[in-house]
Amino acid sequence: MKLPEVAPQLLFEPDPATVRVAGQWTTSVVDEAERMIASIDWPTGTTVRVDGADITALDTGGACVLKRCLAELEDRDCAVELCNLSDRHRAVLALLGDVLEVAPPGPGRVSFLGRVGQSAMAQLSEAYSLAAFIGEVCLVFLRIALQPTRLRWRSMFAHVETAGFDALPIIGLLSFLVGVVIAYQGGAQLRAYGANIFIVELITLTTVRELAPLLTAILVAGRTGSAFTAQLATMKVSEEVDALRAMGIDPIEILVIPRVLALIVALPLLTVFADAMGILGGMVMASTMLDVSMHEFAQRIPQAISLTSFMIGVGKAPVFAVVLAVVGCFQGLQASGGAETVGSRTTLSVVEGIFLVVVADAAFSVLFSWLGV
Amino acid sequence: MNPQDEKVIEVRGLVSRFGDTVVHDRINLEVRRGEIFGLVGGSGSGKSVLLRTLLLLIRPAEGEVDLLGQGTDVMDSSTLNQLRRRLGILFQQGALFSSLSVLDNIAFPLREYTELSSAAIVDIARLKLDLSGLPPETAAKFPRELSGGMLKRAALARAIAMDPELLFLDEPTAGLDPVSANAFDELLLKLKHDLGLTVVMVTHDLDSLWRVTDRVAFLGNKRILALSPMAELSESSDPMIAEYFSGPRGRAAGSEHRGTRSSVSDAGRRD
């Protein structure tokens, strides 16, 4: 008994004013009827007969469009007279009732100032929660320091492996390439003055003091900080964190502390590795482009860079590690609601992590220039 | 032809297979226009596979599936998509798009499939929201802000957005409290009456089976073991079926509904 796909039809006869509604008024094809309604030049202030004798099918979607047409006529002060409509079709039309009469609830509009205020309050409350989280982590950390058996060593070393060891290839390759690039760019300038040998100072100082720690931290933010957030957010959303709490186990102790400590261990080691690979990249470039042999280069390194510079570079790494791990875990545990918050929290964690690492690096620069090291 | 006898779904000799595992072995099935058809069976009996086959998401290994009077085995993908627009589906978890408000969720298929003006789409969506028994304020909310029962209703509103001729429900009352589950059953009966919907539902909810279904198919041993109204099915002598319905839950649901069943089916057939 499938109805043939007959398009909806609408004929308007001006004298006497009659609308003939015919054909199939179903949701999938009723857009045509709507176009016809829009194209007709409707009268005003008369009585209009609406003849539905030839409607073959009418569903709720079609009824909605028909009702809108009738409402349009009423807006033009026309009296509408429905006739020849079958009982079935009348019943469908009646289903609409007065649902459409009530104005749709508009989305609550907030003024510009209101939005500024809302977002400022949201930022403030997030900052407040972050401060509370840092405080909590410190307290748990102190408790563990007094009672080292409470530390989850296994979990910590597993994180050292995934965050540190597994990151060696990518960090090595990237540092090597950055070393090559700096040697190439700087070398061209130095050669113009015949100061080829100073390439050693250029490479080692920039790499060891600034680039290696910063680059490693940024890579780890993308690689490990995001992973921390995604893991913890998934656990939070699937109520695993609540399950831990209900068992009387502190989620900070079992989830956050091992991650923070693992990163404090892994990031300085990765930074030293990045130092070595960056200098190696510079050495390769110097020997091929600037006629500074690897031997000469290596001999000059101790003169070029002091132990203090090296320690400053590596010393930043644990600070960056704490920033990244705390931000990653904090964002993960802030997740609530559905699975979609896992994604948004992860994005936020990476952006915030990199931002704070750069801010911390700038703070270090200011500090060291005051101290004159 | 009496519309009550029109077959909306006709399955002949359906075989479903994954590798060497046969899930269905030559199943025959008919669903008539205007009925609420229940699909039951133990875990792993292939209910979901059958539902997905009827939804045209899985192609059968052998046999034919006719939907709304059209054979589906030789259809190309664009004809299949046309046919799919006439089906509605309510997934178990609702599957509402989390990034859209409830109203936009309901309006989504209308925006995709039709060229209606956005004012008309909003009107239709609001009507569907009302038909699903949700208050108008729900429109602006997001799925994560809804309770389980409201989520199911909103998902139902999206399923009927295009006025489908055939509606599939996958465990519609699972995870609902008894009050919401009862209300959902009533809603289903009302929609069937008002819109002339044909409904195929997979469910484990025995109360729901007694309350709303006209006929129930019992899947087991790769075949349909029985296909009859609930009252008959619960008396079946087949050991698998008897075990399913004779547990304490089955007996409780049965004894409560057996008395009222006839009046309910009369009410359902008023149209």
Image: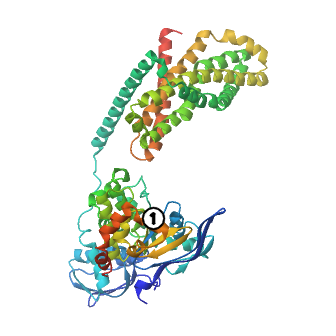
The percent position of residue A7, horizontal first and vertical second, equals 44, 82
Query: Which chain does the numbered disc 1 sit on?
Result: B
- On the picture, is B74 further left or further right than A296? left
Q: Residues within 10 Å of mark 1 (few under 14, many from 20)?
A: few
Q: Tell me the quarter of the picture where residue A92 sits.
A: bottom left
Q: Inspect this view and state whether residue B125 appears.
A: no
Give the structural element (helix, strand or loop) at label 1: helix
**Residue for point 45% across, 84% down:** B6
Left or right: residue A278 versus residue B210 is right
Give the number of callouts: 1
Look at the image and tell me in which quarter the N terminus of chain A lies.
bottom left
* Residue at x 51% of width, y 74% of height: B83
Q: Residue A302: image x %, image y %?
A: 68, 10
**Residue that badge 1 annotates:** B243
* Front-lying residue, A181 or B243: B243
Q: Amino acid at mark 1?
A: Glu
Q: Which residue is rendered at x = 53% and y = 80% of the image?
A: B70
How far across and how far down the image is residue A353, in percent? 48, 31
Does residue B232 appear anywhere in the picture? Answer: yes
Residue A19, above or below A369: below
Q: Position of residue A274 (x, y in %)?
A: 64, 24
Q: Give the quarter of the figure containing the C terminus of chain A.
A: top right
Q: Nearer the viewer, residue A44 or A288?
A: A288
